[in-house]
Image (cartoon, grey):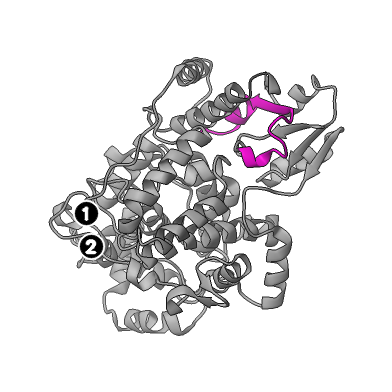
Amino acid sequence: MPRRWLFADQLGPHFLDDRHQPVLLIESKAVFRRRAYHRQKAHLVLSALRHRAAELGDQARYLRAETYAEALREVREPVEVHHPTSRRALALVRRLDGVTVLPPKGFITSLEDFADWADDRRGALRLDAFYRFARQRHGVLVEGEEPVGGRWSLDTENRQPPPKGTARLAVPAPPMPREDDIDAEVRADLDRWEREGIRFVGRDGPRRFPATTKEARARLRHFLTHRLPEFGPYEDAMLAGDPWMAHSMLSAAFNLGLLDPMAAVRGAEQAYRSGRAPLASAEGFVRQILGWRDFVWNLYWYFGPSWRQNNELAARRRVPDWFRDLDADAVTARCLADVLAGVRDHGWVHHIPRLMVLGNYALQRGWRPAELVDWFHHSFVDGYDWVMTANVIGMSQYADLGRMTTKPYVSGGAYVNRMSDYCGDCRYDPKQRLGEDACPFTAGYWAFLARNRHRIPRNARMARTLAQLDRLTDVDAVVAQEEHRATGPP
């Protein structure tokens, strides 16, 4: 049986055909030299890789080298590897002698099935249509060909603001991993690498995310039992004192390959069918895994390498140093300061702070989309090129003018005020767009629309907004104000 090479995002047992199959694991130091990763992400990846080696024992050959190619020169036997998750890694394995590339694993809808579905669409691709296709094809939350409950999406029921007067949701905290000797070794190695000149961003801290399948399964069980019921209603809500809310905190585990996504989908479905979770919550979680995660993975390959370079809104500003270096203390706007601090301290915030705070602010300021893809990739524990290309280029920065979304995800301070508790203690007023107290998000919203009104495709979802823009009498002053304020943190 050929030796199976497992990349550091292919670490679950479902990446092996046989539990006795010989394995190759490679730790490449050059990966961490090329870019400044979040310190906690580097720790998590190395911890997961080394824990997998410890689990496999003599079954695995573990090599530490400067590059993958250098390590493979020591391997004098046939090697096979599942299709990697990045174009760079795929190009590497395809040009190496003696390496056989197998189909991808770790996702539910195959590249071939997605391509057949997408080719038949003959137009813009939308999550809702793909999600319906995937639910039917894989038989998830359906009765025959129809959705359980009569609707494919219960998203409208899963957009509640946080409960008033509460600092934290009334759900049990997620179980946190216990660090061990492997984690201590990783931390010591990263300290040494920093002394040698390898740069990281963010703060070191206790490992908060699973590094083994055992840890990941324990967190999934806990989520399905204790947190899933509250996940749905508040999945779009934000609380300054509750960074985890009722989210599963499993995205990093999925993206390390520790969990089989279909097993998690079936677990949520069973939680609903057994009466342990409402349909809206189960459906919301299924939509994230079977829907969104598979959608962005497949779009990464379907749209090809040029998609990453899309910049149809002509966003030219460099990502500023204060943002790139996670300098939350330099920021006055409470929502942005808190979310940036969450990235700095945890390497993670949930999807709404990413989209409607970080991405929204960047879109309004016209930061370069490709730089933002890199920033999200390196700064988040669950960040990978395939994840962030779609989430940034196609969604948060609208840089492709709607190949996967119908409108820009841009909003003023009113959205943040409705969906969070940030605005009450902020020095900025979400209702003001002009003056010293003007909310950077509210002012930035109108400045963005004025700057891009002739680039954004006109459609029914944008008609009312652009009509409002036409009625503003102070729009030129708002644009000038935001041009001046764009030079530093808000």
Q: CA distance from mark 1 to mark 2?
A: 7 Å
Q: Indicate the position of residue 230 as horizontal and vertical percent values.
A: 30, 57
Q: Callout 1 environment at 10 Å: few (<14), some (14 to 19), or many (20+)?
A: some
Q: Is residue 128 left or right of residue 107?
A: left
Q: Residue furthest front?
A: 274
Number of labels in the image equals 2
Give the residue type at disc 2. Asn
Secondary structure beneath disc 1?
loop
Q: Which image quadrant: the N terminus? A: top right
Sequence-first disc among 1 and 2: 2
Can residue 333 be seen in this snapshot? Answer: no
Secondary structure beneath disc 2?
helix
Give the vertical position of 454 relative to 306 (above or below): below
Residue pointed to by mark 1: 422
Q: Callout 2 environment at 10 Å: few (<14), some (14 to 19), or many (20+)?
A: some
Residue at x 46% of width, y 21% of height: 183
Locate residue 228: give its quadrant: bottom left
Residue at x 27% of width, y 52% of height: 335
Query: Pointers 1 and 2 in contact (CB under 8 A)?
Result: yes
Residue 16 covered by magenta stretch: yes
Q: Indicate the position of residue 178 as horizontal and vertical percent values.
A: 39, 26
Can residue 176 be seen in this snapshot? Answer: yes
Residue at x 61% of width, y 24% of height: 53
Q: Is residue 481 left or right of residue 313?
A: left
What span is colored magenta in the figure? 13-37
Residue 24 covered by magenta stretch: yes
- In this rendered view, identify the residue nearer to me: 389 or 467: 389
Give the residue type at disc 1. Tyr
Residue pointed to by mark 2: 417
- In this rendered view, identify the residue nearer to me: 241 or 209: 209
